[in-house]
Image (cartoon, coloured by chain):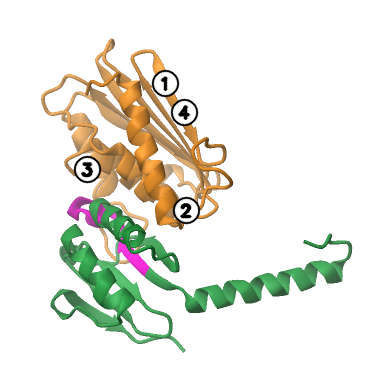
Chain colours: A orange, B green
């Protein structure tokens, strides 16, 4: 994983595999406090306390095909390398929230990368998923929800390539505006 | 649509909707992209993005793009499965965005398996 957006995509896929129908993604890019944080919260099946406590270990997985699970451990490693960390809160039957914090100016901090493509990828084919995406930067915010979006008239169809690509472009433009042309 | 006023109406609606869904599933080809941690690290996001673009370029609408998790063949990621209606499920490995036009043009549209990327086939379930 060479971009934070790929870690975010991995978290979104975790939520989907946990059967989530509602996912909230929050990205807080805060140069003033020198922090970069992202949080993925879902209403999936959640984990027991024991599972949540060891979820970031590579030798913990809910899968039966293999005994290792690398997604969360790679994220924890990337965050800890930047004086940050990962926090996992989960309630069995209710959902899971994963938050990752990074020291923004740390030389080892990976770039955010292509977040529009990552989010579009997570949405592809997921009919019936409600995704809320909120991105904060320098006191401004971009807010998007698949249940109430402005660029696509009618309901969002997660199976339509044209709609997904239009959405990706929309995210790209909006992030450019949010960052005022920088980044 | 007619207003639902009785249980029978509801059941009739359910049956017709199920029939419609079944026809759609039978007639619709599928492309399945491996989107586990291994797939993502190997470039599955870029492969899926290129797939969407290729489908849009060719104006193909009767294909569902689906994602799946890790199937345990991480070293062959990015794994892409192509399923044409009524045909075997064909798995391709080490797929890059550059291979997508061939997978779509050769296999999805014309039904010819792209042999040099082939990993395996699963016989159609009857």
| Residue that label 1 marks | A141
Pick the quarter of the image with the N terminus of chain A. Answer: top left
Do the CB atoms of the residues marked 1 and 3 lie less than 8 Å apart? no
Say which quarter of the image contains residue B12.
bottom right
Residue at 31% x, 47% y is A10
Comparing marks 4 and 3, which lies closer to the viewer?
Answer: 4
Q: Are marks 2 and 1 in contact (CB under 8 Å)?
A: no
Same chain? Circles 4 and 3? yes
Residue behind mark 3: A74
Kindly state the secondary structure of the residue where label 4 is placed: strand
User: Where is A149 relative to B16, above or below?
Assistant: above
What's the distance in space between the residues labelled 2 and 1, CA to CA?
Answer: 24 Å
Tell me, for residue A86, which label it has, or none: none
Identify the chain of the residue marked 1, using the numbered disc in the image. Answer: A
Q: Earlier in the sequence, mark 2 or mark 1?
A: 1
Of the residues under marks 2 and 3, which one precedes in the sequence? Answer: 3
Whether pointer 1 and pointer 4 mark residues with C-beta atoms closer than 8 Å, the reply is: yes
Q: Which residues are magenta?
A: B31-44
Q: In the rendered structure, the residue with mark 4 lies on which chain?
A: A
Does the magenta-highlighted stretch encompass residue B35? yes
């Amino acid at each position: 994983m060479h971009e934070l957006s790929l870690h975010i995509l991995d978290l979104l896929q975790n939520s989907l595999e946990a059967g989530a129908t509602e996912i909230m993604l929050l990205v807080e890019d805060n140069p003033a406090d020198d922090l970069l944080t992202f949080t993925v919260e879902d209403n999936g099946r959640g984990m027991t306390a024991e599972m949540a406590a060891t979820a970031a270990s590579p030798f913990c997985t809910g899968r039966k095909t293999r005994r290792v699970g690398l997604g969360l451990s790679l994220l924890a490693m990337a965050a800890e390398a930047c004086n940050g960390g990962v926090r996992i809160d989960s309630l069995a039957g209710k959902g899971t929230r994963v938050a990752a914090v990074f020291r923004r100016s740390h030389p080892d901090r990976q770039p955010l990368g292509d977040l529009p493509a990552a989010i579009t990828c997570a949405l592809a084919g997921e009919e019936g998923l409600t995704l809320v995406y909120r991105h904060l930067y320098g006191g401004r915010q971009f807010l998007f929800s698949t249940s109430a979006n402005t660029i696509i008239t009618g309901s969002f169809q997660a199976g339509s390539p044209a709609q997904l690509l239009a959405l990706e472009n929309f995210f790209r433009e909006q992030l450019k505006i949010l960052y005022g042309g920088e980044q | 649509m007619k207003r639902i006023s009785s249980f029978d109406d509801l059941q009739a609606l359910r049956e017709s909707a199920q029939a419609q869904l079944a026809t759609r599933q039978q007639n619709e080809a599928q492309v399945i992209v491996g989107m586990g941690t291994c797939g993502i690290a190997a470039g599955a996001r870029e492969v899926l993005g290129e797939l969407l673009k290729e489908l849009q370029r060719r104006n193909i609408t009767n294909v569902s793009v689906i994602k799946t998790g890790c199937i345990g063949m991480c070293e062959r990621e990015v794994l892409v499965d192509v399923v044409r209606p009524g045909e075997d499920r064909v798995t391709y490995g080490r797929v890059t965005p550059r291979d997508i036009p061939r997978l779509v043009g050769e296999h999805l549209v014309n039904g010819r398996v792209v042999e040099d990327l082939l990993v395996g086939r699963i016989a159609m379930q009857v």
